[in-house]
Amino acid sequence: MEGDTSFTGTDSRTDGYNIRLKTGGEVSVGGTSGSPTTMTFESTHTSINGDLYVDGNSALGLNLSNATDAKIAVLKVTGTTQFEQGAQVKLAAKGDDFNANGTTYQLIEAGKIELLSKDGKAVDPVGKLDVVSTSALLKIDSYTVDGKNVVAVVTGKGREEVAQVVADNGGSVNEQATLVTLTGDSIISRLNDSDSFKQLLLNADGGQVAKLASELAPEVSGGARSAATTSQSLISNVTGSRTSSIRGASSGEGFKDAGVWVQSLYSDATQDRRDGIAGYNAYSNGIAVGADGKVNENLTLGLAYSFINTDVNGKSGNQTDVESHAYTLYGGFEQGNYFVDTSLTYGFNDNQSKRSIAGTRAKADYDSDLLGLNLVGGYTYHVSPQVLIEPRLAARYSQVNIDGYREKGSSAALKVEDQRYEAIELGAGMRVAGSFTLGAGTLEPQAKLMAYHDFAADEAQSTSTFLLGSTPFVTTGAKAVRDSYEAGVGADYKLGAVTLGVNYDYIGKSGFNADVFSAKVRYDF
């Protein structure tokens, strides 16, 4: 027999011998062309009425399943079984073998077993047969070969060994912890044999195991958290632009006491891979509406509502869709050339996540909320009647609370605990604005640059438990980046009671960048 071959037959315990040979006949695996050959017996138990020979560069493949009787030979040969030096028996093990105690199997029973020399011409008294596992997570703890039997003890690899398999194939610490928990909780043995995840994991090599571990690990890229804070960032730019434009106008035209506005928003953000954590792309679009007016000569107050939809596409293949609703109270205070702009935002979000795991899809639906506070203060220098410069100091606080959730749709689904994150940022920068007559209206361009430092620097972290398990494990995201910077340009055109405006903002930090575009219409009463 040349080339890899699979023999599919019925269980020999039911209908006797599966393979019958003429007198003196023999099944030869390899040995003629010199090409390596593996003959795999796919039935639970197989019997050969005759002899069996396996060449030194070839192997027998034995499949173990929950139907395998460990006390009955997986392969029974009535005649002589000969293994040339270098021959192997490869075991494809079942889920029950993923336990510390291991399982003892009678693999081969023969009338006689002979281990031959390398040339296959004589029996080697010290000859050796190799019994190996096809799964990177299982090991042959021990095996014996006597004159008639091959018996092996199959054991699941320990925690350190499992982690090492993942690490040796490029897996992260999170992926190691996830797979160690999966195997340590004996989850695999509880799955149906037909489960696609189980089928892939049982006989995966090291590279395949590492890939599966990456799919198993919970999402810690921070995409959902970023989506939750997007509304705060976008709406603060909107309201900050509004109060700033009032100061710009004060150097030229007057402004109305009250007005309403609507603004469209779009953001494209990219997080690169950092510290072994896959990044993501996030696309946000939405709308904000608001109204504001002067309470007195120094104070302006306003209220805004925003709806933003964000699609977070993880570079690991995971996806999260976030619908955000936020309400913002904002205001501006002026005393001479000094000013303070502030906003308070509360937002609530509906999150829908999807993770692809070995051909299955783990889904979850959960909520999160945001509390955000922005404070900007500075001094307005009028360089000329048309141009002003504002040095600025800023403080920002945000708190994101993500509800715990339970996934469904996959045998490897997780229960994830609540999460809470904070950002406490201080910043400094400058804004330059102008006011110029253009046609029948006024053009007001502006540019700003800010740098921030986050004193909280919370890292993404989750505590998870497999639904079929009981042991919680912790996974962490990339180390938090404390420093960020923001730059923006925009222009408003005022024509009577109507103002049209466009803005572009850039947000950057190590491994992260976002482009933010907005367009607005305002009507002053």
Image: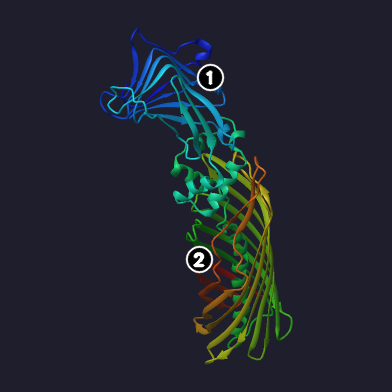
Q: CA distance from mark 1 to mark 2?
A: 64 Å
Residue 235, percent from left and from top: 62, 68
Mark 2 residue crowding within 10 angstroms, few (<14) / some (14–19) / many (20+): some
- Kind of residue at disc 2: Ala
Residue 349, percent from left and from top: 66, 57
Q: Nearer the viewer, mark 1 or mark 2?
A: 1
Residue 137, percent from left and from top: 50, 40
Vertical relation: 329 (above or below) 442: above
Image quadrant of residue 452? bottom right
Toward the right, the furthest residue is 295
The residue tagged 1 is: 72
Vertical relation: 30 (above or below) 99: above
Q: Which dot marks residue 514?
A: 2
Residue 525 visible? The answer is: no
Residue 341 visible? The answer is: yes
Residue 247, percent from left and from top: 61, 84
Image quadrant of residue 190? top right
Q: Of callouts 1 and 2, which one flags the residue occurring earlier in the amino acid sequence?
A: 1
Residue beneath the point at 57% across and 26% down: 66
Vertical relation: 501 (above or below) 339: above
Closer to the camera in the image, 271 or 188 = 188
Q: Quadrant of the N terminus?
A: top left
Report the number of discs.
2
Q: Which dot marks residue 416?
A: none
- Kind of residue at disc 1: Ile
Residue beneath the point at 58% across and 62% down: 226
Task: For mark 2, give the secondary structure.
Answer: strand
Q: Are marks 1 and 2 in contact (CB under 8 Å)?
A: no
Q: Quadrant of the C terminus?
A: bottom right
